[in-house]
Image (cartoon, rainbow, N blue to C red):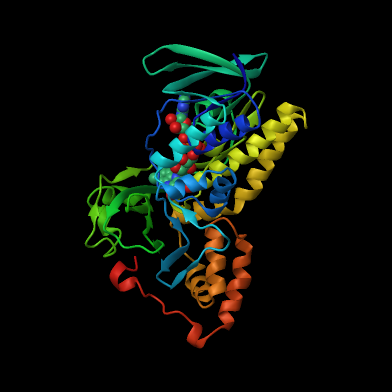
């Protein structure tokens, strides 16, 4: 059978793309070398723009019904000031285990009419006259197979085979600078997310399914070996005291940053395959869902004759690059653990005014443009007295770093 679109990779970017294309009536094949439900090396914070898409697609209720916490408040606990408040807008940060989220998306794609091959690894692209026309690969037990389509979407993650085989050009690449570790924790009382940025690390704790919390620690690469094992708990000061790790500490330094041109003749990229950034700001899943939304619209329009496919995909790239630019800069800067020049005055100024805290959380959530921070900080600087928040409240138990 010839498909309209083959999607390689069926986690957030790929399964959501397949779901939307199938709902639009296209013939879709989605393949993944993994089987579902299955875990992947990732924590779980979906920023509010991604949550809004899950709501729009009718998937949020099932995640909430499975006990997934919607986190409406966060505490950003910097040595210079504590910013504690609510996210702006109707949605908070959602924190589903990937075993749950990814399987739900795959099931929804299938229910919408996409054909899904699990346990199928793509090894190469098929080409006709300089255009990608399909994929070839093998099932786990070795049986080879191939399939053809008008467009192949690479949603196959940061080490994308589709991008490599298609020759997708990289740009704005920044070298990996951090190492990341995380573990599940039992017995940690949390009312929201907590983030502890320090000079030599960033630690955060977030509730997730099954009454567990996920504890995430990011450090400069040079410190990775110190914290990946026994040093993990120490990275959280006293915050994990009295709790138990429910499972091993998972760790990686495979944390690239960079953009790829996300389309060419017969192919397109979504999610980490097209734009990857360090997980320190927890943007990747939301970005993958946003890519799926925009790419599916471009493909529906381009393949349906609404506008030339190339123009639709070029608009997809422009929009992606415009929307992610500021967060990419924030993320790569935080992951570099350089001197925190702004923090010393910016955070105390923002902390004086609840509107400043909301603005700051909105920026981290990808809801508020970062240039709104400066006017908010200036407003805060004018406020004094009883509205000022105490500084360094967490340092004694956490360590200033
Ligand atoms: C330690 C860590 C913590 C993170 N924490 C967060 C967080 O809290 N919040 C957040 O938003 N993001 C986080 N991220 C990033 C997030 O995991 C990714 O951005 C997100 O998973 C990208 O989704 P995706 O669908 O593009 O790719 P992936 O989730 O990587 O999925 C790609 C899929 O493609 C399949 N595949 C790959 N190659 C092939 C092939 N050749 N043939 C067939 N299938 C193939 C894989 O099996 C996989 O299932 C974290 C990342 C790390 C490393």
Q: Quadrant of residue 243?
A: bottom left
Percent of width and height locating residue 59: 52, 43
Q: Quadrant of the C terminus?
A: bottom left
Percent of width and height locating residue 326: 60, 54
Percent of width and height locating residue 20: 60, 35
Q: Is residue 347 visible?
A: yes
Residue sitting at 48 percent across and 13 percent down? Answer: 145
Q: Quadrant of the N terminus?
A: top right
Residue sitting at 50 percent across and 26 percent down? Answer: 161
Residue sitting at 54 percent across and 77 percent down? Answer: 353
Along the line of sight, the residue nearer the viewer: 280 or 122: 122
Q: Is residue 108 above or below residue 332?
A: above
Q: Is residue 333 above or below residue 303?
A: below
Q: Is residue 29 above or below residue 69?
A: above
Specify the quarter for ligand 1.
Answer: top left
Percent of width and height locating residue 214: 35, 52
Q: Is residue 254 visible?
A: no
Along the line of sight, the residue nearer the viewer: 227 or 72: 72
Left or right: 299 as drawn, with respect to 339: right
Along the line of sight, the residue nearer the viewer: 53 or 240: 53
Residue sitting at 45 percent across and 64 percent down? Answer: 74
Left or right: 325 as drawn, with respect to 225: right
């Amino acid at each position: 059978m010839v498909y309209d679109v083959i999607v390689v990779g069926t986690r957030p970017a790929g399964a959501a793309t397949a779901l939307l294309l199938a709902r639009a009536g296209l013939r879709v094949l989605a393949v993944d070398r993994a089987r579902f439900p299955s875990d992947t090396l990732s924590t779980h914070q979906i920023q509010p723009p991604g949550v809004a898409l899950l709501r729009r697609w009718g998937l949020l209720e099932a995640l909430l019904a499975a006990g997934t916490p919607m986190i409406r408040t966060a505490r950003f606990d910097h040595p210079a000031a504590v910013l504690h408040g609510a996210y702006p807008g109707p949605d908070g940060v959602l924190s589903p285990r990937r075993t749950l989220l990814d399987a739900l998306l795959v099931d929804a794609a299938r229910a919408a009419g996409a054909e899904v091959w699990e346990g199928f690894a793509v090894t190469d692209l098929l080409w006709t006259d300089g255009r990608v026309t399909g994929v070839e690969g093998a099932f786990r037990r070795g049986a080879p197979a191939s399939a053809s389509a008008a467009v192949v979407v690479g949603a196959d993650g940061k080490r994308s085979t589709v991008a490599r085989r298609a020759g997708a050009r990289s740009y704005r690449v920044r070298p990996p600078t951090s190492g990341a570790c995380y573990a599940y924790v039992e017995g940690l009382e949390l009312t929201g997310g907590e983030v502890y940025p320090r000079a030599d690390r960033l630690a955060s704790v977030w509730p997730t399914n099954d009454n567990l919390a996920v504890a995430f620690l990011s450090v400069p690469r040079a410190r990775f070996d110190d914290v990946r094992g026994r040093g993990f708990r120490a990275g959280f000061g006293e915050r994990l005291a009295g709790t138990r790790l429910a499972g091993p500490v998972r760790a990686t330094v495979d944390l690239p940053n960079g953009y790829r041109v996300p389309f060419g003749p017969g192919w397109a990229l979504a999610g980490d395959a097209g734009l990857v950034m360090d997980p320190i700001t927890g943007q990747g899943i939301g970005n993958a869902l946003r890519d799926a939304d925009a790419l599916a619209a471009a493909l529906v329009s381009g393949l349906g004759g609404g506008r030339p496919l190339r123009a639709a995909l070029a608009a997809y790239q422009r929009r992606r690059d415009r929307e992610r630019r500021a967060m990419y800069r924030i993320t790569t800067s935080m992951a570099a653990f350089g001197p925190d020049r702004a923090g010393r005055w910016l955070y105390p100024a923002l902390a004086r005014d609840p509107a400043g805290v909301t603005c700051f959380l909105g920026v981290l959530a990808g809801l508020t443009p970062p240039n709104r921070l400066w006017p908010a900080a200036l407003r805060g600087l004018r406020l004094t007295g009883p509205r000022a928040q105490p500084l360094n409240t967490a340092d004694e138990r956490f360590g200033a770093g």
